[in-house]
Image (cartoon, helix red, strand yellow):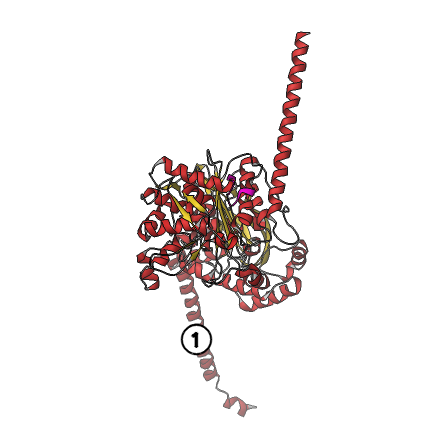
Amino acid sequence: MQEEQQFKDYQREAKLFRNRILVMAGFMLILASTVVYRYYDLQIVNHEEYATQSERNRVHVQPVPPTRGLIFDRNGELLADNKPSFTLYVISNNQAELDTTLDLLKTLIDITPVDLEKFYKAKKQRRHALDPVPLRYRLTEEEIAKVAVNQHLLEGVEVNAELVRNYPYRDLFAHVIGYTGRISEKEVAAFTPEQVQRYSGTHSIGKNGIERSYEDVLLGQVGSQNVETNARGRVMRVLDRIDPKQGSDLHLYLDARLQETATAVMRGRRGAVVAIDVKTGGVLAAVSYPSFDPNLFVTGISVPNYRALNQDIDTPLFNRFLQAQYPPGSTVKPVMGLAGLYHGFTDVNRAIADRGFYTLPGSSRIYRDWILAKTGGGHGMVNLKSAIAESCNTYFWDLGVRMGIDHMSKFGSHFGLGMLTGIDIPSERKGVWPSREWKRGAKGQAWYPGDTVNMSVGQGFVLMTPIQLAVMTATIANRGVRYRPQFVRQIGDQPLAPIVESQLDTKSEYWDAIYEGMAEVMHGARGTARRVSERAEYRMAGKSGTAQAVGIAQNAKYNSALLKERHRDHALFIAFAPVENPQIAVAVMLENAEGGSSQAAPVARAMMDAHLLGYYLGQDDFVPPLGFHPAAIIKRANNYIAERKAAREAQAAAQSSASVSSAAAVGN
């Protein structure tokens, strides 16, 4: 026991223990110093910076989208409004959590690959990591209930009510109003910093039509609110708010009843109808048929729906009245006749003997008038008035050759031919009103006399859109005053003034001659569209036209029965009324319908009856089982007119009887 005590060094062990204590104390002192320094750095040196970052994690600014402006027709009918819709939003900055959430949502509601694709695109565009990203629009009540029941499992998922664009007339105004749609990555990349700010609270933008051209005034001004959120990004409370400014409402020249009438008479055909207010240039109706439902595009159209529209042989997405270019045919003859009068190459009484064909001096080529195939002869002696009424090609071939391309080309500019009309919706095409310079640049060729012959009757290189035809017709009705066509009449409380583009100053007797010739088309004994004016209560002026869809050899005869339906001639008609004080100008183009007077003219008559007499048609009218029957329009119009006359006579008789009774009572 004594030996064991000799081997134990208490002094050494005590020293070792003291050293360990000192090392641990030094280490603890260093740790404490580090904590104190870090605390000093966070709380004193960088207090403001970290406090700001902390506040940003807890409080951040959210944009508040404005309510988009509404669109009304001239009578206050709502054409585009905002409809409440429930949208599913997801807030997540963790990909693993996001994947889990999306997998669960797929078991509850229908989420397509297209929805996911658009979701991830929108996620890239968000400004803040905790900004909500839309995943599904237009949730049903059942889907909302499923999300609500499983809310405890769906952190970062919320269903919010918001306003989305709605078009109550569906396909009736699709090519005019256009539609809104989700903002694409390409559009975001093109945004200016100011636009990024303006669109921070919305996911949609005007894609075409009025929605696109008036986007700035319809959109409004974005608001903002400071909100307090939890760690998941869910809003706990709103700290303060700046309300957004609603977009301006638009009031149009369009008449929904007239638009319905145009759609009714176009049903079963392909083509376009445009009606213009002669006194202002305001567009009263503009129909491209067939059409489509713009509501399909508002929150993102499905792949099957878009494929069906895009692959439809009748091309419903194509805006025919603004973008389709057709040879105008004989509808340009009034302009050519006026050009001849204006430049002194003809006069009101000058007449020629028409044998049914025309040949250029020194040429063997024969240009056959349409009447030659029908009667074996010509129109006989024709002057300007009868040449317009009977659509005598020979008269205008002769006039065109004597006048020359330079005069014709320059004169057409007074009517807006070959140029953009300036209408207030995008994507307009300007057609072709050729000149020597145009052909040299476009075709690399000189201008030939045969080109002049074709141009004088609206064929050859000449191409026009239906809106150009309508503007040309309104300019004739206005005796040379050409207004810019406009859809929008008023923005908010601010009316828009009509815009005069040009004015042709010429003799009144020249205009009278053109008016009389076009009136003879409708009311003359030999007018090409005389049947259309039967029992009309007003006088109308018009001109038919036929445009080839495919070329026919010189010596070949046009035979409709041997041609496929889509290879037959197009039918055109222009008209204005009343002749004494024009109020409305109409242009009609029917693809492959062949007869301008027999097929397109009844459509123009229906439009003028609706505007001038109040004979409006519903969308279910005139839908015959075997296609389009113009005789039905005239019959229905005549019956309507007869009913109006009978009602007026009965009312007059009743008033007369009441007056006699009253007088007798006074006498007694």
Q: Amino acid at mark 1?
A: Leu
Q: Residue at x 59, y 38 (%)?
A: 615
Q: Is residue 281 left or right of residue 664?
A: left
Q: Is residue 507 left or right of residue 168?
A: left
User: Where are the magenta residues, as a range?
Assistant: 523-531
Dominant secondary structure of the magenta stretch? loop
Residue 526, magenta (yes or no): yes
Q: Is residue 581 above or below residue 58?
A: above
21 and 582: which one is in front?
582
Q: Which residue is mark 1?
A: 22
Residue 80 seen: no
Residue 396, magenta (yes or no): no
Whole-percent x, y for residue 472 in the image: 42, 45
Q: Is residue 244 left or right of residue 292?
A: left
Whole-percent x, y for residue 133 in the image: 53, 59
Question: In terms of secondary structure, where does tag 1 sit?
Answer: helix
Q: Is residue 375 above or below residue 310?
A: above
Whole-percent x, y for residue 414 in the image: 35, 45
Whole-percent x, y for residue 602 in the image: 56, 45
The quadrant holding residue 191 is bottom left
Q: Residues within 10 Å of mark 1 (few under 14, many from 20)?
A: few
553 and 153: which one is in front?
553
